Amino acid sequence: MQFTAKVTDILKQRTACAIIAVDTKNRLTDSGSALDKANDGALAKLLKRGDLGSTIGSTLMVPNLESGCDRILLVRSSKAPISQPEFRKLANNSARAIKSLKDATSYLTEVAVKDADITWQGAQLALAAGLASYKFTRCHSDAKPNPLAKFTAHAPEKKQLKALQKGVEFGGGQALGSNVARELGNLPGNICTPSYLASEAKALAKKHTKLTTTVLDNKKMESLGMGAFMSVAKGSDEPAAMIAMNYKGGKTGQKPIVLVGKGITFDTGGISLKPGAMMDEMKFDMCGAASVFGVMNALVEMNAPVNVVGVVAAAENMPSGRASKPGDVVTSMSGKTIEILNTDAEGRLVLCDALTWAGKFKPSVVIDVATLTGACVIALGHHATGLYANQDKLAEDLIAAGETAGDRAWRMPLWDEYQPMLNSNFADMQNIGGREAGSVTAACFLARFAEDYNWAHLDIAGSAWKSGAAKGATGRPVPLLLQYILNKK
């Protein structure tokens, strides 16, 4: 999809649709007023009839006015300056309304937003348009993708053009990365296997000279002592893969940010078998890995001036004669032993070895991303990602990035008082801590393998996908991660 910023004249701009804001008193912004005047007050008359709803974000498509625009999309705003969440609603609702068109030009940049500049507005508009353009067609025999291929953001003044272009390019990168993550997450488990993810990582490296890919197979992981990871992988006929995508866009010698994604391409629960209802959604258990792929794709496309390593721990969790049993004890790459009480708590077993391996990249910070616990969904619902960190500044920066991107996270406790819940009579620790504080004890488990560096854990079990009629991967937390990474450059 092509994203551009441009100073336009709405009466001359050739576009399939021009998007215009209307406040609660039916006042149009400058471009809308110019268009209305050129059409003898046609928009004012239409608004007076009340066809545009009063709810913020309501939309109304208007065809055939005298201008270069094939149609006009009116979007209900409130009295300026509007809040950032209100602007996102305008951006998202208008993007959904124009996704079936080939192109659109947005004049929503003429709306003043509290505590936000034109760069931020451009990023939000491009992100919304890019997300709306996505449609899963891979496994349909006759489905066609959404036609939206070009999105233009209007710069109200020439001096704002450069700043707006910067925002549009960044938002477009966030959308690209999110859509890569959505596509991988939406693929069924019989296509998106660990080997498939490895091949995607290798293909990305072939396309971009600044990125190299390393893949560890089962034999190599066993030789490195990744006993926790292999305790999960050995139950499946599909070979596992530990993948590292190393992007060197920053200064030589600059310590990289390392992202670690949980890549359980299908999760049956293993011997601790899940209920059959909605088990199909366990193809989404690799959405942490998918988000890492999304970030890496966006960084190379944007030629971002940063050093980032994307690590993906990819395996299936299956029941078989080779699968781990409750009560088994395994030795992790760190040398710490783990009593497996529940084989459905497998994400932390693959991640703990990935976190140990991540240390070899000498990171400035490590952030793992995982659909780790149902307990996080109970705690935070589907709106916020659960955030844990062993450093306050890191947590603050991630939360701020999420607020800016509209991809919010909420910090959860990582207190020492929770650690005894993981005590085992037969090993250094057990892999679950009981029913209480399940998301917290899962993070406490991972924290034991991340003591040598600054580390954060994002539990995206509630935010990575939607169920029901809107079933599908969301691409979160790609916008948050990209905002954080590029804030640090």
Image (cartoon, helix red, strand yellow):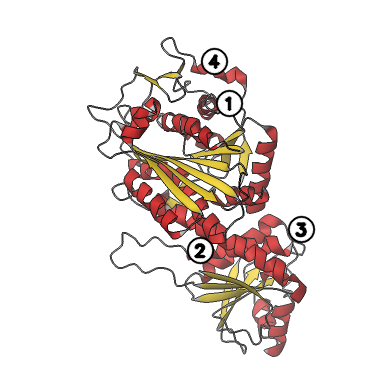
Position of 111 relative to 424 (above/below): below
- For the point 58% across and 26% down, the residue is 451
Task: Estimate the spatial distance between the alpha carbons at disc 3 and disc 4, rounded to whole Å.
Answer: 46 Å
Q: Which of marks 2 and 1 is in front?
A: 1
Between discs 3 and 1, the one toward the N terminus? 3
Q: Nearer the viewer, residue 180 or 278?
A: 180
Q: Is residue 256 left or right of residue 146?
A: right
Label placed on residue 114: 3
Position of 455 relative to 448 (above/below): below
Q: How crowded is mark 2: few (under 14 residues within 10 Å), some or many (20 or more)?
A: many
Residue 151 image offset from top left, x and y in percent: 56, 72
Between discs 4 and 2, the one toward the N terminus? 2
Where is mark 2, residue-wise? Answer: 132
Where is mark 4, residue-wise? Answer: 420
Q: Residue 327: which quarter of the image?
A: top left
Q: How crowded is mark 3: few (under 14 residues within 10 Å), some or many (20 or more)?
A: few
Between discs 2 and 1, the one toward the N terminus? 2
Q: In this view, does 215 lie to the left or right of 373?
A: left
Q: Which of 446 and 40 is in front in this view?
A: 446
Task: Estimate the spatial distance between the alpha carbons at disc 4 and disc 2, rounded to whole Å.
Answer: 46 Å
Where is mark 1, residue-wise? Answer: 451
Task: Estimate the spatial distance between the alpha carbons at disc 3 and disc 1, rounded to whole Å.
Answer: 40 Å
Position of 104 relative to 176 (above/below): below
